[in-house]
Image (spheres, rainbow, N blue to C red):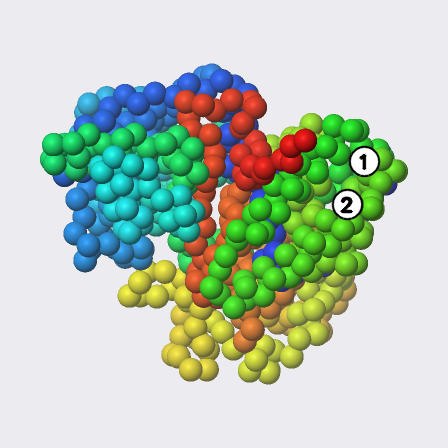
Amino acid sequence: MTEVSRRAPQVVMRLARLGSMHQSRLSFMRVLTRRMARENWRFEKTAFEINDNGVGHAVYTAHGPDRSYSLIAFAHDLPPEKRSDRVIADAWDATYTLFDGVPTGSDIERLSANIPVQEAGRVTNTELSVSRSNRSVRLWEHVVDALANGHQPSVEKIDAVGYLMRTTAVYGSGKLGAADREMIADRPEFRAPFQVEMLSVYLTRWFVLDLVQHMADVRARESGAEAVALDLDIARSMGIGNSTGLGMAPFLLNHPVLFNNWIAARENAVQVVRGVQSATAEDISLFRDVFERNKKIAETWVSEHPIQIEKLAALREDVEKVDGYLADADLNAASPWNTLYEWAEEHLSLEGQEWVASLILEPYGVLVDEFAEGMAADNTATFRIAGAMKIGDLRALLREIYGWAIETDWTAPASKARAWYVSEEKLEPRLGERFEEPIEEYEQPLAPGRDAAQLYQALAHWSEDAQVADFLLRHPEHRHVLRRVQIVGRAPYAEIRDNTISDHVLPIDMLRCKLSFFGATKFDPRSDRWVRICMYGNAPLPHELSNENADYWVFPQHEKATA
């Protein structure tokens, strides 16, 4: 191995770079499908009691080596005027819970009174997640109608949307009374982050495909005909959509240790692969194959948002540059991946650089997959303030981590133009205009850079040898950011090194960063504050999941030249 330094937080943790990240081997969907295939999980549908109006419940159970988990899905006949993706909605096309084990009839009866009403209901610690979804109405109707009339739906129409239903929330970790994360964190299958939610979505996809087929069968039967079965290749191409807005953006700021562990795992993986001294013929072949398949993602990735259109144009130029590089490069030479990465740093956009950083990991599961085991976080110890810390040490930390913030002119309106708050009407995080709306008194503590600069200023007259505890007795208003500084001192990737309330902050950068760790591709921003994605598109269906298809499904198949 070649000695290669890990990328510095000052480089990685800028919003523009975080907003250019791509899925990788460490993305949570792929972590789950690899595990389920490796451990030979078994899947079965144990109930499908849906009537001709599309109302009822179904149960899908995943049997792991030690435990079983069941998705209980409730289907509803939702009037069009009630269909809304907002968090304040009170009705959906389908609602779900991931149950710990196999439910009894009494469990289903209890949950039928609670899951369909979501926030208005309550669940217990046998429920691991609560979720809901709405149909993509035009595509749903097209698929039902096509199958009912004896032919397959349009592949072009399906590719343009990618999903039949989109989730509007997948709640876990104690929401509505569901099991707290601590109750399941020591289970191997849930050790990596968001595995409960990823399993819920994977099983939801199965249910949605069954439901659309059921509704097509009903429609055909009503006309005295027989529907055709949805082609497996078409079924596999569809995932589950998701509309993600500002509610997710504060997550990265509110979970600094967890965020650090995600980024650190990826950076460790990139460092290890860049340090590979020589690549085998098999490694090179796999990399070139994945690169070719990724070119199709870049070609078919579309967006109507100006920012993403510009980034896509840059990415496509980058793809051509990498194509040219690989045509001439000798990947059998020493340190081929470090050479490629350093070339990318010099010649590609941030989008292209992060694309390459993810791609070089693909041949090296044996080196990097284990980093997923360290991506969860126990915050208990890290949230204790070290009161004996000397003020001099605190000052040094502030200068190292928040030097950019200390140098920012926080009296300038542009530096603090925005404010994060929670909307009373929508019950969602919002980013408002500080000088145009009466929101400042409701501001959430989501501007750590500004708060760190204020802390640094408040320390001006304190002795280097004074203790933090003494300072906080006088100035308790700085407690929250002082704790944060100490956390970042131990977890260097915990902090975004940018102004989160400036006049040019783009919340979609935070959204994309988080969603890339979920494993999303083809991000489609609808504004600078919300984005649509598709999850599990092209993933193997439960009955066909194997070690051979459990990992690289995320990359489109490409047509290889034939002699």
Residue 228: give x, y in percent of width and height.
Answer: 27, 31
Q: Is residue 561 left or right of residue 5?
A: left
Which of the two discs, 1 and 2, labels the residue nearer the N terminus? 1
Circle 2 — which element? Answer: helix
Indicate which disc residue 276 carries: 1
Q: Residue 61 falls in which quadrant of the image?
A: top left
What residue is at 47 percent from the left and 34 percent from the top?
539
The quarter of the picture where the C terminus appears is top right
The answer to whether one can see residue 182 in this image is no
Other residues around mark 2 within 10 Å, as few (<14) / some (14–19) / many (≥20): some
Other residues around mark 1 within 10 Å, as few (<14) / some (14–19) / many (≥20): some
Q: Is residue 475 left or right of residue 86?
A: right
Residue 491: give x, y in percent of width and height.
Answer: 66, 48
Residue wearing tag 2: 326
Looking at the rendered structure, the kind of residue marked 1 is Val
Residue 87: give x, y in percent of width and height.
Answer: 31, 55
Residue 30: give x, y in percent of width and height.
Answer: 54, 34
What residue is at 80 percent from the left and 51 percent from the top?
342
Q: In this view, does 418 lie to the left or right of 235?
A: right
Give the camera-side residue of 198 and 175: 198
What residue is at 38 percent from the left and 35 percent from the top?
235
507 shown above or below 342:
below
Spatial CA span between label 1 and label 2:
18 Å
